[in-house]
Image (tube, helix red, strand yellow):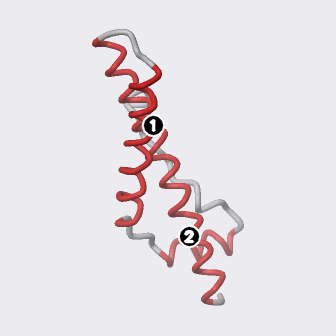
Amino acid sequence: MKKSKLKSLVKSARKTAKKDIKLSLVTELKEIAGKFGEGSKKINKDIEKASKQLAKKLSKDIKIDKATLIADNKKGTAATEPEVVTAETV
């Protein structure tokens, strides 16, 4: 596999992980904020912004297993969609 193709696979896996992290953070934080009182636009906006920033920092530090990406790409499966476990699915 070419190096450029591998880089794009890693980048897309990292991007998907970033989206999943942000989504799970937003849902959990909004749920917690809802328990303490009525939500507002300002609180929701702050939650969205902070979740985006934290997801960016966390996704940078994620180590993507390149061997798994190569194997899954050869099989034709979507390796860039990691499974997200939330409190609702546990």
**Residue name at image x 49 percent, y 55 percent:** 17
Question: Which residue is farthest right?
Answer: 76
**Residue name at image x 42 percent, y 57 percent:** 56
Residue neighbourhood size for the residue with mark 1, other residues' Cα within 10 Å, grouped as few (<14), some (14–19), many (≥20): some
Contact (Cβ within 8 Å) of mark 2 with mark 1: no
Q: Horizontal and vertical percent for residue 36?
A: 28, 12
Q: What's the mark number on residue 27? A: none
**Residue name at image x 58 percent, y 54 percent:** 81
Q: Quadrant of the C terminus?
A: top left
Location of mark 1 (residue) = 48
Question: Which residue is farthest bottom?
Answer: 2
Q: Nearer the viewer, mark 2 or mark 1?
A: 1
**Residue name at image x 42 percent, y 40 percent:** 85
Residue toward you, 9 or 46: 46
Q: Quadrant of residue 27?
A: top left
Per the image, label 2 sits on a secondary structure element best described as: helix
Instruction: Looking at the image, tell me whether mark 2 or mark 1 is earlier in sequence order.
Output: 2
Amino acid type of the residue that numbered disc 1 sits on in the rendered structure: Glu
Location of mark 2 (residue) = 11
Residue toward you, 64 or 33: 33
Q: Horizontal and vertical percent for residue 70?
A: 59, 77
